[in-house]
Image: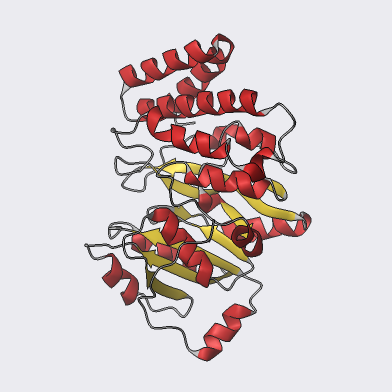
Amino acid sequence: MPLADATLDAPTAPPAVMDARATSPGVSVVIPAKNAATYIGETIASALAQCDVTEIIVVDDGSTDDTVAIVRAIRDPRLRLITNDASGVSAARNHGAQSAGGSWLMFLDADDRLRPDAVRTLLAAAKDAPRAVLVYGDYNTIDSAGRSIGRRDLLKGRRKPSGNVLERLASGNFIVNGGIMLVRTEAFRATGGFDVSLRYCEDWHCWCRLAATGAFAHVPKLLLDYRLHTANTMSAAVRTPQDFLPAVARVFGDELILGKLPSGAAPRLRQAAEIHLLTYAATQAVRFGRYRQAAAYLGMVSRRSPKAMPRAAVKIALSYLGI
């Protein structure tokens, strides 16, 4: 599965800059953007504030608003703008990764913002786990105006898995957002990047492929402000659990992933993944006041596994509290 091709929009960097990128041990932040004028400036500013970021690559995916003009108005030698010819977010991320020069990649959404020292925190975790192909932290949620609405600070000390995480990850995407992680550029390219045939949960599939190749490391810190609003792809009212099922089929039809799972574990993990996505859909419905939908999704969980319903109900209740 090769990385998607696209066309370079902005002038290429001078040879000296290109040479520096080619040998850089630093971090390349890839920001796919489509009609992101409302937030793109704030997002880029949060990345430029990270002293350990070598370059920021904004990949415009066919914007018709002022996104391109806003990016071009920001004068910083670390910032580049390329285009992706409206090929979709996965192709945009892949294209940015193709041209990245850093040893590490971060995939930051165009409406989110990094917290101070987020990248430095991740690099420190990577130094303590030299064999990890991916290091990740956690996020809090903000609304359209940038106000904090999450209460994940109440989960201080919560630890997610490190080491061989594939089995756990195949049962449900506990990472959620690429802006809380660094992934080794070499590993990302070797596994083929994001599957452009998937419209949703393409990140989960990508993380699973990476987990099949090496260890992950978790740092229990809030590193990102993740913006929740009605334009979020995963939060829009038209999304249903049926939209996510192609990704489940892709994960459990992927020979790289299946080859690293314990023998006979795939059916159990597939059911767990479906329950995870139903629960996630219910939590998003609660966050946007769609309580009937949330109840319907919880009923779908119960029909798949009555034993899973209490835990799903707790997660849905926590989402009401912003956790």
Quarter occupied by residue 5: bottom left
Residue 287 in picture, x, y percent from top left: 37, 29
Q: Residue at x 22, y 62 (%)?
A: 65
Residue 56 in picture, x, y percent from top left: 48, 69
Residue 176 in picture, x, y percent from top left: 52, 41
Q: Residue at x 65, y 59 (%)?
A: 187
In this rendering, is residue 300 above or below 38?
above
The reply to whether residue 156 is in sight is no
Q: Residue at x 36, y 75 (%)?
A: 74
Report the front residue among 290 and 239: 239
In this rendering, is residue 231 above or below 316?
below
Report the front residue among 228 and 115: 228
Left or right of 31 on screen, residue 251: right
In this rendering, is residue 218 above or below 284?
below
In this rendering, is residue 75 above or below 253?
below
The quadrant of the rendering that contains the N terminus is bottom right
Q: Residue at x 64, y 56 (%)?
A: 122
Looking at the image, what colour scheme do you see?
A: secondary structure
What count of labels does the image hold? 0
The reply to whether residue 170 is in sight is yes
Residue 130 in picture, x, y percent from top left: 77, 58
Left or right of 130 on screen, residue 42: left
Left or right of 55 on screen, residue 61: left
